Amino acid sequence: MLSGRLLLVSTLLVVTRSIPIDRNAKIPEEQNNVEDKEEDDSLDTGLYYDRYLREVIDVLETDTHFREKLQAANADDIKSGKLSKELDFVSHHVRTKLDELKRQEVSRLRMLIKAKMDATTDQNVQIDHTSLLKQFEHLDQQNQHTFEARDLEMLIKAATRDLESYDAARHEEFKRYEMLKEHERREYLKSLDEEKREKEERRLEEMKQKHKEHPKVNVPGSRDQLQEVWEETDGLDPKEFNPKTFFKLHDTNGDGVLDEQEMEALFTKELEKVYDPKNEEDDMMEMEEERLRMREHVMKNVDTNHDRLVSLQEFLKSTERKDFSNTAGWETLDEKPAYTEQELRQFEADLAVQEAELGKRAEQLWKEHEDLKQRERELQEQKKEYQQAVMQMAQRKKAPQVQEQPPSGPQEELQFVGDKQPEKEKMEQTHLQTETLPPTEPPRNQPDQAF
Protein backbone atom coordinates (compact mmCIF):
# COMPACT_ATOMS: atom_id res chain seq x y z
CA MET A 1 0.00 0.00 0.00
CA LEU A 2 2.53 2.54 1.14
CA SER A 3 5.65 0.45 0.59
CA GLY A 4 7.41 3.15 -1.43
CA ARG A 5 6.79 5.80 1.16
CA LEU A 6 7.79 3.44 3.93
CA LEU A 7 10.99 2.66 2.08
CA LEU A 8 11.79 6.36 1.89
CA VAL A 9 10.93 6.88 5.52
CA SER A 10 12.86 3.77 6.54
CA THR A 11 15.87 5.05 4.69
CA LEU A 12 15.76 8.44 6.38
CA LEU A 13 14.13 8.05 9.79
CA VAL A 14 15.54 6.47 12.95
CA VAL A 15 12.98 4.83 15.20
CA THR A 16 13.73 4.85 18.92
CA ARG A 17 10.92 2.65 20.19
CA SER A 18 9.40 -0.62 19.05
CA ILE A 19 6.56 -2.87 20.23
CA PRO A 20 6.26 -6.68 20.21
CA ILE A 21 4.59 -8.31 17.24
CA ASP A 22 1.48 -10.34 18.00
CA ARG A 23 0.79 -12.68 15.08
CA ASN A 24 -2.37 -14.03 16.68
CA ALA A 25 -4.19 -10.72 16.69
CA LYS A 26 -6.13 -9.87 13.54
CA ILE A 27 -6.62 -6.21 12.81
CA PRO A 28 -9.14 -4.98 10.23
CA GLU A 29 -7.52 -3.36 7.21
CA GLU A 30 -9.12 0.06 7.83
CA GLN A 31 -8.03 0.09 11.45
CA ASN A 32 -4.57 -1.05 10.41
CA ASN A 33 -4.33 1.87 7.98
CA VAL A 34 -5.18 4.34 10.75
CA GLU A 35 -2.68 2.78 13.13
CA ASP A 36 0.04 2.83 10.47
CA LYS A 37 -0.55 6.54 9.97
CA GLU A 38 -0.60 7.26 13.70
CA GLU A 39 2.56 5.21 14.21
CA ASP A 40 4.33 6.99 11.38
CA ASP A 41 3.28 10.38 12.74
CA SER A 42 4.65 9.50 16.16
CA LEU A 43 8.16 8.75 14.89
CA ASP A 44 10.84 11.32 15.62
CA THR A 45 14.23 11.45 13.95
CA GLY A 46 15.67 13.95 16.39
CA LEU A 47 16.70 16.16 13.47
CA TYR A 48 16.11 19.89 13.80
CA TYR A 49 14.38 19.83 10.39
CA ASP A 50 12.28 16.74 11.21
CA ARG A 51 8.94 18.47 10.60
CA TYR A 52 10.07 19.89 7.27
CA LEU A 53 11.28 16.43 6.20
CA ARG A 54 7.95 14.82 7.04
CA GLU A 55 5.86 17.50 5.40
CA VAL A 56 7.84 17.23 2.16
CA ILE A 57 7.36 13.45 2.12
CA ASP A 58 3.62 13.82 2.81
CA VAL A 59 3.15 16.30 -0.06
CA LEU A 60 5.18 14.23 -2.53
CA GLU A 61 3.12 11.17 -1.70
CA THR A 62 -0.02 12.94 -2.95
CA ASP A 63 1.36 13.03 -6.51
CA THR A 64 0.45 9.90 -8.48
CA HIS A 65 3.51 9.98 -10.74
CA PHE A 66 5.98 10.45 -7.92
CA ARG A 67 4.28 7.81 -5.78
CA GLU A 68 4.62 5.24 -8.59
CA LYS A 69 8.31 6.06 -9.03
CA LEU A 70 8.80 5.88 -5.28
CA GLN A 71 7.25 2.43 -5.06
CA ALA A 72 9.53 1.18 -7.85
CA ALA A 73 12.67 2.74 -6.36
CA ASN A 74 15.16 1.01 -4.09
CA ALA A 75 17.22 2.45 -1.26
CA ASP A 76 20.17 3.20 -3.54
CA ASP A 77 17.97 5.20 -5.94
CA ILE A 78 16.66 7.24 -3.03
CA LYS A 79 20.00 7.87 -1.33
CA SER A 80 21.89 8.63 -4.56
CA GLY A 81 19.47 11.40 -5.52
CA LYS A 82 18.21 9.62 -8.64
CA LEU A 83 14.64 9.88 -7.40
CA SER A 84 14.99 13.65 -7.04
CA LYS A 85 14.94 14.07 -10.82
CA GLU A 86 11.32 12.87 -10.88
CA LEU A 87 10.32 16.11 -9.14
CA ASP A 88 10.23 17.84 -12.52
CA PHE A 89 7.24 15.69 -13.50
CA VAL A 90 4.99 16.26 -10.47
CA SER A 91 1.84 18.35 -10.76
CA HIS A 92 1.80 22.14 -10.47
CA HIS A 93 -0.41 21.90 -7.38
CA VAL A 94 2.18 19.76 -5.60
CA ARG A 95 5.04 22.05 -6.63
CA THR A 96 3.13 25.02 -5.25
CA LYS A 97 2.73 23.28 -1.88
CA LEU A 98 6.42 22.38 -1.83
CA ASP A 99 7.34 26.00 -2.61
CA GLU A 100 5.25 27.14 0.35
CA LEU A 101 6.85 24.55 2.64
CA LYS A 102 10.31 25.75 1.68
CA ARG A 103 9.44 29.40 2.28
CA GLN A 104 8.07 28.48 5.70
CA GLU A 105 11.25 26.55 6.50
CA VAL A 106 13.45 29.46 5.43
CA SER A 107 11.35 31.79 7.59
CA ARG A 108 11.68 29.41 10.55
CA LEU A 109 15.45 29.24 10.12
CA ARG A 110 15.63 33.03 9.96
CA MET A 111 13.76 33.24 13.27
CA LEU A 112 16.13 30.70 14.83
CA ILE A 113 19.13 32.68 13.63
CA LYS A 114 17.70 35.94 14.95
CA ALA A 115 16.86 34.41 18.33
CA LYS A 116 20.38 33.02 18.63
CA MET A 117 22.00 36.28 17.58
CA ASP A 118 19.81 38.31 19.97
CA ALA A 119 20.91 36.08 22.82
CA THR A 120 24.62 36.26 22.07
CA THR A 121 25.35 39.59 20.34
CA ASP A 122 24.49 43.25 20.41
CA GLN A 123 20.97 43.87 19.13
CA ASN A 124 22.21 46.79 17.02
CA VAL A 125 24.39 44.50 14.88
CA GLN A 126 22.99 43.91 11.40
CA ILE A 127 22.42 40.20 10.63
CA ASP A 128 23.31 38.77 7.20
CA HIS A 129 20.67 36.03 7.03
CA THR A 130 21.78 34.88 3.58
CA SER A 131 25.29 34.07 4.79
CA LEU A 132 24.06 32.42 7.98
CA LEU A 133 21.60 30.24 6.06
CA LYS A 134 24.54 28.55 4.36
CA GLN A 135 25.18 26.53 7.52
CA PHE A 136 21.92 24.64 6.86
CA GLU A 137 22.53 21.92 4.30
CA HIS A 138 19.07 20.39 4.00
CA LEU A 139 17.89 23.00 1.47
CA ASP A 140 19.28 25.16 -1.30
CA GLN A 141 19.80 28.54 0.37
CA GLN A 142 20.67 30.22 -2.94
CA ASN A 143 17.03 29.85 -3.97
CA GLN A 144 14.83 30.68 -0.99
CA HIS A 145 11.47 30.79 -2.78
CA THR A 146 10.91 27.63 -4.83
CA PHE A 147 11.41 23.94 -4.13
CA GLU A 148 13.51 22.35 -6.86
CA ALA A 149 15.03 18.92 -7.51
CA ARG A 150 18.23 20.10 -5.84
CA ASP A 151 16.26 20.77 -2.64
CA LEU A 152 14.96 17.21 -2.53
CA GLU A 153 18.41 15.82 -3.24
CA MET A 154 19.99 17.95 -0.51
CA LEU A 155 17.25 17.01 1.95
CA ILE A 156 17.76 13.27 1.40
CA LYS A 157 21.55 13.48 1.57
CA ALA A 158 21.51 15.67 4.67
CA ALA A 159 19.08 13.37 6.46
CA THR A 160 21.10 10.28 5.53
CA ARG A 161 24.33 11.86 6.72
CA ASP A 162 22.86 13.28 9.92
CA LEU A 163 21.16 10.02 10.83
CA GLU A 164 24.43 8.16 10.46
CA SER A 165 25.89 10.33 13.22
CA TYR A 166 22.66 10.30 15.21
CA ASP A 167 23.39 6.97 16.91
CA ALA A 168 26.79 8.23 18.03
CA ALA A 169 25.13 11.31 19.50
CA ARG A 170 22.66 9.09 21.35
CA HIS A 171 25.50 7.06 22.83
CA GLU A 172 27.23 10.24 24.00
CA GLU A 173 24.01 11.55 25.51
CA PHE A 174 23.52 8.27 27.38
CA LYS A 175 27.09 8.40 28.69
CA ARG A 176 26.47 11.88 30.12
CA TYR A 177 23.25 10.62 31.67
CA GLU A 178 25.06 7.74 33.39
CA MET A 179 27.90 9.95 34.65
CA LEU A 180 25.46 12.51 36.02
CA LYS A 181 23.55 9.75 37.79
CA GLU A 182 26.76 8.43 39.38
CA HIS A 183 27.85 11.96 40.32
CA GLU A 184 24.53 12.63 42.08
CA ARG A 185 24.77 9.28 43.86
CA ARG A 186 28.21 10.11 45.23
CA GLU A 187 27.20 13.62 46.27
CA TYR A 188 24.16 12.24 48.06
CA LEU A 189 26.27 9.74 49.98
CA LYS A 190 28.64 12.53 51.02
CA SER A 191 25.74 14.45 52.54
CA LEU A 192 24.87 11.56 54.92
CA ASP A 193 26.46 10.75 58.25
CA GLU A 194 28.54 7.57 58.50
CA GLU A 195 25.76 5.30 59.74
CA LYS A 196 23.21 6.40 57.15
CA ARG A 197 25.82 6.32 54.40
CA GLU A 198 26.73 2.70 55.13
CA LYS A 199 23.07 1.74 55.18
CA GLU A 200 22.41 3.47 51.86
CA GLU A 201 25.46 1.89 50.25
CA ARG A 202 24.23 -1.57 51.26
CA ARG A 203 20.82 -0.82 49.80
CA LEU A 204 22.28 0.36 46.49
CA GLU A 205 24.55 -2.66 46.25
CA GLU A 206 21.60 -5.00 46.82
CA MET A 207 19.68 -3.28 44.01
CA LYS A 208 22.69 -3.61 41.72
CA GLN A 209 23.02 -7.32 42.40
CA LYS A 210 19.29 -7.83 41.96
CA HIS A 211 19.44 -6.18 38.55
CA LYS A 212 22.16 -8.62 37.49
CA GLU A 213 20.04 -11.62 38.42
CA HIS A 214 18.27 -12.31 35.14
CA PRO A 215 18.02 -15.14 32.61
CA LYS A 216 20.62 -15.53 29.92
CA VAL A 217 20.40 -12.90 27.22
CA ASN A 218 21.00 -14.31 23.75
CA VAL A 219 23.24 -12.59 21.25
CA PRO A 220 21.03 -10.47 18.94
CA GLY A 221 20.63 -12.07 15.51
CA SER A 222 21.86 -15.48 16.66
CA ARG A 223 19.94 -18.73 16.11
CA ASP A 224 18.99 -18.93 19.80
CA GLN A 225 17.64 -15.40 19.80
CA LEU A 226 15.61 -15.77 16.59
CA GLN A 227 14.25 -19.19 17.58
CA GLU A 228 13.06 -17.75 20.88
CA VAL A 229 11.09 -15.09 18.98
CA TRP A 230 9.81 -17.78 16.60
CA GLU A 231 8.52 -19.84 19.53
CA GLU A 232 7.35 -17.28 22.11
CA THR A 233 6.23 -14.36 19.95
CA ASP A 234 5.15 -16.12 16.75
CA GLY A 235 3.85 -19.22 18.57
CA LEU A 236 5.56 -21.67 16.19
CA ASP A 237 7.41 -24.91 16.77
CA PRO A 238 11.14 -24.17 17.35
CA LYS A 239 12.03 -27.42 15.55
CA GLU A 240 10.47 -26.03 12.38
CA PHE A 241 12.40 -22.76 12.39
CA ASN A 242 12.83 -21.43 8.86
CA PRO A 243 14.83 -18.21 8.26
CA LYS A 244 12.95 -17.28 5.08
CA THR A 245 9.56 -17.72 6.74
CA PHE A 246 10.83 -15.82 9.78
CA PHE A 247 11.88 -12.89 7.57
CA LYS A 248 8.49 -12.67 5.86
CA LEU A 249 6.67 -12.87 9.19
CA HIS A 250 8.58 -9.89 10.57
CA ASP A 251 8.58 -7.81 7.41
CA THR A 252 5.45 -6.18 8.79
CA ASN A 253 4.91 -3.70 5.95
CA GLY A 254 5.75 -6.18 3.20
CA ASP A 255 8.31 -3.97 1.47
CA GLY A 256 10.87 -6.77 1.15
CA VAL A 257 13.31 -5.39 3.75
CA LEU A 258 13.63 -5.25 7.53
CA ASP A 259 14.04 -1.66 8.62
CA GLU A 260 15.46 -0.54 11.97
CA GLN A 261 12.04 -0.51 13.63
CA GLU A 262 11.30 -4.05 12.55
CA MET A 263 14.74 -5.18 13.68
CA GLU A 264 14.42 -3.60 17.13
CA ALA A 265 11.06 -5.28 17.62
CA LEU A 266 12.90 -8.61 17.54
CA PHE A 267 14.87 -7.69 20.67
CA THR A 268 11.90 -7.04 22.94
CA LYS A 269 11.91 -10.51 24.49
CA GLU A 270 15.62 -10.25 25.32
CA LEU A 271 15.20 -6.80 26.87
CA GLU A 272 12.30 -7.98 29.00
CA LYS A 273 14.65 -10.48 30.64
CA VAL A 274 16.73 -7.63 32.07
CA TYR A 275 14.43 -4.66 32.43
CA ASP A 276 11.06 -4.27 34.11
CA PRO A 277 9.55 -0.79 34.51
CA LYS A 278 8.02 -1.92 37.81
CA ASN A 279 11.42 -2.63 39.38
CA GLU A 280 13.27 0.21 41.07
CA GLU A 281 16.64 -1.26 40.13
CA ASP A 282 15.85 -1.28 36.38
CA ASP A 283 16.51 1.94 34.47
CA MET A 284 14.43 2.35 31.31
CA MET A 285 17.00 4.74 29.84
CA GLU A 286 19.49 1.88 30.03
CA MET A 287 16.98 -0.40 28.31
CA GLU A 288 16.75 1.93 25.30
CA GLU A 289 20.54 2.14 25.13
CA GLU A 290 20.65 -1.66 25.23
CA ARG A 291 18.13 -1.80 22.36
CA LEU A 292 20.29 0.56 20.32
CA ARG A 293 23.42 -1.54 20.98
CA MET A 294 21.59 -4.70 19.89
CA ARG A 295 20.37 -3.13 16.67
CA GLU A 296 23.84 -1.78 15.84
CA HIS A 297 25.33 -5.23 16.45
CA VAL A 298 22.92 -6.89 13.99
CA MET A 299 23.25 -4.16 11.36
CA LYS A 300 27.02 -4.34 11.53
CA ASN A 301 26.99 -8.08 10.82
CA VAL A 302 23.99 -8.37 8.50
CA ASP A 303 23.59 -5.04 6.63
CA THR A 304 26.45 -5.60 4.18
CA ASN A 305 25.67 -2.64 1.89
CA HIS A 306 25.18 -0.23 4.85
CA ASP A 307 21.85 1.16 3.68
CA ARG A 308 20.32 0.74 7.18
CA LEU A 309 17.99 -1.91 5.76
CA VAL A 310 18.25 -5.73 5.80
CA SER A 311 17.18 -7.44 2.60
CA LEU A 312 16.06 -11.07 2.44
CA GLN A 313 19.31 -12.02 0.74
CA GLU A 314 21.38 -10.35 3.46
CA PHE A 315 19.31 -12.00 6.18
CA LEU A 316 19.59 -15.49 4.71
CA LYS A 317 23.32 -15.06 4.19
CA SER A 318 23.78 -14.08 7.85
CA THR A 319 22.16 -17.37 8.97
CA GLU A 320 24.87 -19.25 7.12
CA ARG A 321 27.69 -17.66 9.03
CA LYS A 322 29.53 -19.49 11.78
CA ASP A 323 28.68 -16.98 14.52
CA PHE A 324 24.95 -17.49 13.80
CA SER A 325 25.13 -20.54 16.06
CA ASN A 326 26.92 -18.61 18.80
CA THR A 327 25.50 -19.80 22.12
CA ALA A 328 27.39 -17.32 24.28
CA GLY A 329 25.36 -14.76 26.15
CA TRP A 330 25.06 -11.07 25.33
CA GLU A 331 27.19 -8.74 27.44
CA THR A 332 24.73 -6.25 28.96
CA LEU A 333 25.43 -2.70 30.09
CA ASP A 334 25.94 -3.66 33.73
CA GLU A 335 28.85 -5.82 32.55
CA LYS A 336 30.20 -3.15 30.24
CA PRO A 337 30.12 0.33 31.83
CA ALA A 338 29.43 3.27 29.55
CA TYR A 339 32.33 5.37 30.92
CA THR A 340 35.69 5.13 32.67
CA GLU A 341 36.66 6.62 36.02
CA GLN A 342 38.85 9.14 34.24
CA GLU A 343 35.93 10.26 32.06
CA LEU A 344 33.81 10.63 35.17
CA ARG A 345 36.43 12.85 36.86
CA GLN A 346 36.64 15.04 33.77
CA PHE A 347 32.86 15.22 33.62
CA GLU A 348 32.68 16.32 37.27
CA ALA A 349 35.37 18.97 36.66
CA ASP A 350 33.43 20.35 33.69
CA LEU A 351 30.24 20.22 35.71
CA ALA A 352 31.86 22.25 38.51
CA VAL A 353 32.91 24.91 36.00
CA GLN A 354 29.38 25.05 34.57
CA GLU A 355 27.87 25.33 38.04
CA ALA A 356 30.24 28.19 38.90
CA GLU A 357 29.28 30.02 35.70
CA LEU A 358 25.60 29.45 36.42
CA GLY A 359 26.14 30.77 39.94
CA LYS A 360 27.70 33.97 38.60
CA ARG A 361 24.93 34.34 36.08
CA ALA A 362 22.31 33.80 38.78
CA GLU A 363 23.96 36.45 40.95
CA GLN A 364 24.01 38.87 38.05
CA LEU A 365 20.36 38.20 37.27
CA TRP A 366 19.46 38.74 40.95
CA LYS A 367 21.25 42.09 40.96
CA GLU A 368 19.45 43.10 37.78
CA HIS A 369 16.22 41.99 39.40
CA GLU A 370 16.85 44.18 42.45
CA ASP A 371 17.77 47.14 40.22
CA LEU A 372 14.54 46.70 38.30
CA LYS A 373 12.55 46.59 41.54
CA GLN A 374 14.24 49.81 42.73
CA ARG A 375 13.54 51.45 39.40
CA GLU A 376 9.91 50.31 39.66
CA ARG A 377 9.59 51.92 43.09
CA GLU A 378 11.01 55.18 41.75
CA LEU A 379 8.60 55.13 38.85
CA GLN A 380 5.71 54.52 41.23
CA GLU A 381 6.74 57.59 43.27
CA GLN A 382 6.95 59.69 40.12
CA LYS A 383 3.56 58.40 39.08
CA LYS A 384 2.04 59.48 42.40
CA GLU A 385 3.59 62.95 42.07
CA TYR A 386 2.21 63.31 38.56
CA GLN A 387 -1.23 62.18 39.70
CA GLN A 388 -1.23 64.73 42.54
CA ALA A 389 -0.17 67.48 40.15
CA VAL A 390 -2.95 66.56 37.74
CA MET A 391 -5.51 66.57 40.58
CA GLN A 392 -4.38 70.02 41.74
CA MET A 393 -4.65 71.40 38.23
CA ALA A 394 -8.12 69.92 37.90
CA GLN A 395 -9.22 71.50 41.22
CA ARG A 396 -7.95 74.92 40.13
CA LYS A 397 -9.92 74.67 36.92
CA LYS A 398 -13.09 73.84 38.86
CA ALA A 399 -12.70 76.82 41.34
CA PRO A 400 -14.90 80.00 40.50
CA GLN A 401 -12.96 82.73 38.70
CA VAL A 402 -13.48 86.29 40.32
CA GLN A 403 -12.53 89.13 38.00
CA GLU A 404 -10.95 91.99 40.00
CA GLN A 405 -11.81 95.62 39.01
CA PRO A 406 -8.90 98.03 38.84
CA PRO A 407 -8.87 100.53 41.80
CA SER A 408 -10.29 104.01 41.26
CA GLY A 409 -9.95 107.37 43.01
CA PRO A 410 -12.62 109.68 44.54
CA GLN A 411 -13.44 111.12 41.17
CA GLU A 412 -13.73 107.67 39.54
CA GLU A 413 -10.27 108.08 38.00
CA LEU A 414 -8.06 105.07 37.61
CA GLN A 415 -5.63 104.59 40.41
CA PHE A 416 -2.52 102.51 39.93
CA VAL A 417 -0.91 100.44 42.57
CA GLY A 418 1.78 103.06 43.14
CA ASP A 419 -0.92 105.70 43.85
CA LYS A 420 -2.88 103.55 46.18
CA GLN A 421 -2.07 105.32 49.48
CA PRO A 422 -4.27 105.99 52.51
CA GLU A 423 -5.53 109.63 52.97
CA LYS A 424 -4.16 109.91 56.48
CA GLU A 425 -0.66 109.03 55.29
CA LYS A 426 -0.92 111.72 52.59
CA MET A 427 -1.87 114.44 55.15
CA GLU A 428 0.99 113.48 57.44
CA GLN A 429 3.47 113.65 54.61
CA THR A 430 2.15 117.11 53.59
CA HIS A 431 2.47 118.33 57.20
CA LEU A 432 6.03 117.10 57.47
CA GLN A 433 6.98 118.76 54.23
CA THR A 434 5.47 122.06 55.49
CA GLU A 435 7.46 121.96 58.73
CA THR A 436 10.73 121.40 56.98
CA LEU A 437 10.37 124.41 54.66
CA PRO A 438 12.13 127.73 55.84
CA PRO A 439 9.88 130.74 56.83
CA THR A 440 8.95 133.05 54.00
CA GLU A 441 10.34 136.68 54.28
CA PRO A 442 8.34 139.69 53.03
CA PRO A 443 9.58 141.31 49.82
CA ARG A 444 11.94 144.32 50.21
CA ASN A 445 12.00 147.74 48.45
CA GLN A 446 8.92 147.12 46.48
CA PRO A 447 6.36 149.88 45.86
CA ASP A 448 2.90 149.68 47.21
CA GLN A 449 0.51 148.19 44.94
CA ALA A 450 -2.31 150.34 43.82
CA PHE A 451 -5.77 149.08 44.05
Image (cartoon, rainbow, N blue to C red):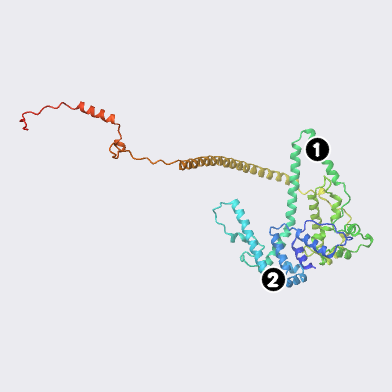
Between disc 2 and disc 1, the foreground one is 2
Q: Residue at x 81, y 53 (%)?
A: 290
Q: Nearer the viewer, residue 58 or 225?
A: 58
Q: Which residue is mark 2?
A: 87
Q: On the rendered structure, is 30 left or right of 431? A: right
- Please provide percent x and percent y for residue 357: 64, 44
Can you see residue 359?
Answer: yes
- Please provide percent x and percent y for residue 386: 50, 42
Tell me the amino acid under the disc marked 1: Glu
Can you see residue 341?
Answer: no
Q: Helix or strand or loop: what does disc 1 sit on?
A: helix
Q: Quadrant of the C terminus?
A: top left
Give residue 206's quadrant in the image.
Answer: top right
Q: Of the numbered discs in the image, which one, if any, rests on residue 200?
A: 1
Q: Residue at x 86, y 54 (%)?
A: 270
Of mark 2 and mark 1, the one earlier in the sequence is 2
